[in-house]
Image (cartoon, rainbow, N blue to C red):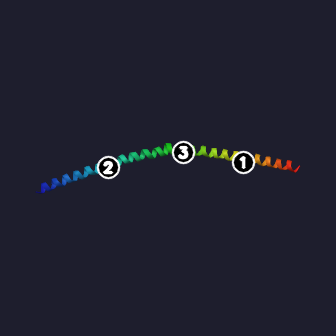
């Protein structure tokens, strides 16, 4: 009678171990997948984004410089026309 109880407990414990090992394997797979994604972001996507942000900043700076230059030219023309009109 005690041998049967022992065998039942043993089978129950083995089944529990099997379930825990399956859960562990699933978690390890998820950890690998997450690690791959994190590495993708850290090594590829974030640096690429930083480069793109720098390009955009340069472009916007150039646009701003161009706008300032155009404004100065326009101001100079307006002042010249005022002088011509006054003369």
Q: Residue furthest right?
A: 87
| Picture residue at 50% right of the left edge, 42% below the top | 44
Task: From the viewer's side, name the closer residue of 12 and 33.
Answer: 33
For the residues labelled 1 and 3, the Cα–Cα distance comes to 28 Å
Local crowd size for mark 1, using a 10 Å CA cut-off: few (<14), some (14–19), many (≥20): few
Is 33 left, or right, of 22 in this rendering? Answer: right
| Picture residue at 25% right of the left edge, 49% below the top | 18
| Picture residue at 45% right of the left edge, 47% below the top | 38
Local crowd size for mark 3, using a 10 Å CA cut-off: few (<14), some (14–19), many (≥20): few
Q: In what quadrant of the picture does the N terminus appear?
A: bottom left
Q: Residue furthest front?
A: 85
Is 81 left, or right, of 15 in this rendering? Answer: right
Task: From the viewer's side, name the closer residue of 78 and 71.
Answer: 78
Which one is closest to the eye, mark 1 or mark 3?
1
Q: Which mark is residue 24?
A: 2
Q: Earlier in the sequence, mark 1 or mark 3?
A: 3
Residue 13 position within the rendered picture, expressed as x and y whole percent measured from the top left: 22, 53
| Picture residue at 14% right of the left edge, 56% below the top | 5
Is 38 left, or right, of 68 in this rendering? Answer: left
Residue 40 position within the rendered picture, expressed as x and y whole percent measured from the top left: 46, 44
Task: From the viewer's side, name the closer residue of 84 and 22.
Answer: 84
Classify mark 3: helix, strand or loop: helix
Residue 55 position within the rendered picture, expressed as x and y whole percent measured from the top left: 60, 43
**Quarter location, residue 50:** top right
Classify mark 1: helix, strand or loop: helix
For the residues labelled 3 and 2, the Cα–Cα distance comes to 35 Å
Residue designated by label 3: 49
For the residues labelled 1 and 2, the Cα–Cα distance comes to 63 Å
Which one is closest to the eye, mark 3 or mark 2?
3
Residue 42 position within the rendered picture, expressed as x and y whole percent measured from the top left: 49, 45
Q: Earlier in the sequence, mark 1 or mark 2?
A: 2
Q: Which mark is residue 68?
A: 1
């Amino acid at each position: 009678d005690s041998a049967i109880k022992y065998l039942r407990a043993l089978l129950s414990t083995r089944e529990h171990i099997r379930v825990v090992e399956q859960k562990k394997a699933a978690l390890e797979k998820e950890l690998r997948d997450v690690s791959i994604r994190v590495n993708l972001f850290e090594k590829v996507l974030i640096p690429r984004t930083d480069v793109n942000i720098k390009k955009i900043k340069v472009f916007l700076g150039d646009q701003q410089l161009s706008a300032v230059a155009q404004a100065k030219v326009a101001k100079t023309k307006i002042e010249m026309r005022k002088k011509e009109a006054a003369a």
